[in-house]
Image (tube, grey):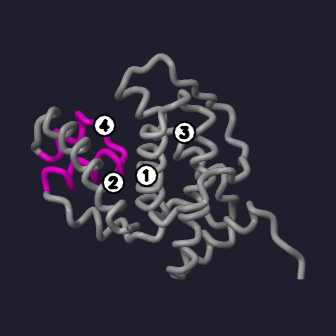
């Protein structure tokens, strides 16, 4: 039996996940998290492990929310890295940080040289998000999952811009705590 390369394996897992295979979806998220970590590590300032993990989690949430937009006839790598780049750009815009290097032309797949422990990918993200109170859940759903700007999310939800920003910040912190408790 011929072995598949890592890219083909990731493509196969995503297609199986879209067909309803939950185990394949967990495996896809685990592998995607490792690749994202490697991809993003090269683009974030050194020593910002917290930013790296936040960005990986935000990207996984976006992938989860946007998985229906993936065309299974195409390779998953460029789609995955495009989402990661957009999440990173959003982070840069939010922080208005000058020191983060973003190479928008580099979407080639990178080997998964990241952290092998990725239990967070097996956690049901939908279920965790539903446990958040509305003042945290709604801002995360609108800005992180639907990709709205803070201003648009505020208009749609009837919340203030400040409430959206605070809700996202607190909600992501709470989700990170929930994920850590599920891992342990």
Q: Earlier in the sequence, mark 2 or mark 3?
A: 3
Q: Earlier in the sequence, mark 3 or mark 4?
A: 3
Q: CA distance from mark 4 to mark 1?
A: 19 Å
Q: Residue furthest top?
A: 98
Q: Secondary structure at mark 3?
A: helix
State yes or no: residue 45 in magenta.
Answer: no
Tell me whether the residue at label 1 lies in contact with that at label 2, contact meaning CB atoms closer than 8 angstroms: yes
Which of pointers 3 and 4 indicates the residue nearer the eye? 3
Q: Tell me where residue 23 sits by quadrant.
A: bottom right
Q: Could you tell me which residue is drawn at 53 percent across and 73 percent down?
A: 25
**Circle number at residue 85:** 3
Location of residue 49 in the rendering, given as x and y in whole percent from the top left corner: 48, 39
Magenta-highlighted residues: 134-157
Q: Could you tell me which residue is drawn at 39 percent across and 20 percent down?
A: 96
Q: CA distance from mark 2 to mark 4?
A: 22 Å
Q: Earlier in the sequence, mark 2 or mark 4?
A: 4
């Amino acid at each position: 039996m011929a072995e598949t390369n890592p890219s083909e394996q990731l493509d196969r897992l995503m297609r199986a996940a879209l067909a309803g295979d939950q185990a394949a979806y967990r495996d896809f998220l685990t592998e995607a998290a490792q690749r994202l970590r490697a991809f993003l590590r090269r683009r974030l300032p050194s020593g910002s492990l917290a930013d790296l993990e936040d960005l990986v989690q935000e990207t996984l949430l976006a992938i989860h929310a946007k998985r229906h937009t993936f065309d299974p006839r195409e390779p998953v790598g460029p789609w995955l890295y495009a989402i990661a780049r957009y999440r990173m750009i959003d982070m840069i815009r939010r922080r208005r940080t000058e020191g983060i290097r973003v190479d928008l032309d580099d979407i080639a797949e990178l080997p998964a040289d990241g952290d092998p422990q990725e239990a967070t990918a097996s956690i049901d993200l939908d279920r965790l998000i539903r446990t958040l109170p509305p003042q945290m859940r709604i801002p995360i759903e609108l800005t992180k999952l639907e990709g709205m700007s803070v201003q648009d999310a505020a208009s749609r939800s009837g919340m203030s811009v400040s409430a959206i920003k605070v809700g996202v910040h607190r909600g992501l912190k709470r989700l990170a705590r929930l994920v850590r408790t599920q891992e342990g």
